[in-house]
Amino acid sequence: MRLFLQRSGAAAVTVCAAALNAASPLLHWPYLLVPVIGSLSLLLISAGLKDPFALQVSIIVFLITWNGLFWNPHWPFPLLVPLALYFLAVLATGGLRRNALWLRAGRPDRLTWVFSAFIVLVSSAGLISWFFLFRPDLTKWLRAVPDFGPVLLVPTGIGFAVLNAALEESVYRGIVMQGLDAAFGAGWLSVILQAVPFGAMHIHGIPNGGAGVVMAVIYGLMLGFIRRRSRGMLAPFVTHVFADMVIFFILVAWAR
């Protein structure tokens, strides 16, 4: 009975943490205090439950929420500081370190790479279509693009794509999806649930707005499928890098 209650509590904490993570980008002060206080409460509850997977989700959601409250970070790398602090916590705690099982490359086969290539094509076409259909105001993001000149343009784009993909994949297809798998089993429910906060995060990103959220949720589902099929992070990471390169060069084209 005790084990059942522990597992049920861990599942509830994981789902609530994912829900708070999805709600945070949609809220403004003072309503932002709800996920801020909620994430702290879930962190304390998960620590009491001593479930390493729910605790990892609670830690990253807590860090993302509080980082957004105090620093109000903007694209392109709002997850950098929270993820760095998460890794410090994992490295300092033996139980978390042993259960950071999401840090695996996996074994993507040939068909997985075919799916990845298809997702890259579909997502790139979707981004370009969004750009031409909605003509979004990209001014604030253009300020984040350094003017290194044509010689460093390609390596800058690759660097942005690699870092941004690594951050987002680590959080959503890594930490969050691992927690959901532990709560509900490695089925499709966790693939669906991890895509929701990933999509909500893009309300102020690229693509943005309501259409951007829907597109990002669909993209998160596709990346979750690749993550599930390959049983690791390499294939979704590589797929994500190519999509982010498209975003970077859309910004460059807009600036010119």
Image (cartoon, rainbow, N blue to C red):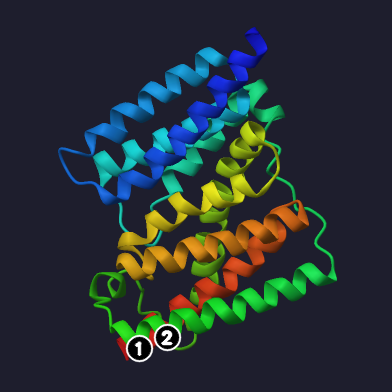
Residue that protrudes farthest toward the top in the picture: 2
Confirm whether residue 154 shows in the render. Answer: no
Q: Which quadrant would residue 50 be assigned to in this image?
A: top right
Q: Residue at x 44, y 33 (%)?
A: 16
In the displayed structure, 89 sits above or below 83; it is above
SS at badge 2: helix
Q: Residue 4, which numbered label?
A: none
In the image, 90 versus 49, the foreground residue is 49
Q: Is residue 105 above or below residue 83?
A: below
Residue lying at 65% horizontally and 49% vertically, measured from the top left: 188
- For numbered disc 1, what is the local secondary structure? helix
Could you tell me residue 172's position as x and y percent? 54, 49
Task: Categorize mark 1 by other alpha carbons within 10 Å: few (<14), some (14-19), many (20+).
Answer: few
Task: Name which residue lies at 57% across and 60% down.
Answer: 221
Three-letter residue code for mark 1: Phe
Q: Which residue is mark 2?
A: 129
Check whether the beta carbons of the residues at disc 2 and disc 1 lie within 8 A of each other.
Answer: yes
Q: Which residue is mark 1?
A: 132
For residue 222, side relative to residue 255 (left or right): right
User: Residue 78: image x %, image y %?
Assistant: 38, 52
Total marks shown come to 2
The crowding category of the residue bearing disc 2, from other C-alpha atoms within 10 Å (few below 14, some 14 to 19, many at least 20), is few
Q: Position of residue 77 (x, y in %)?
A: 41, 57
Farthest bottom residue in view: 256
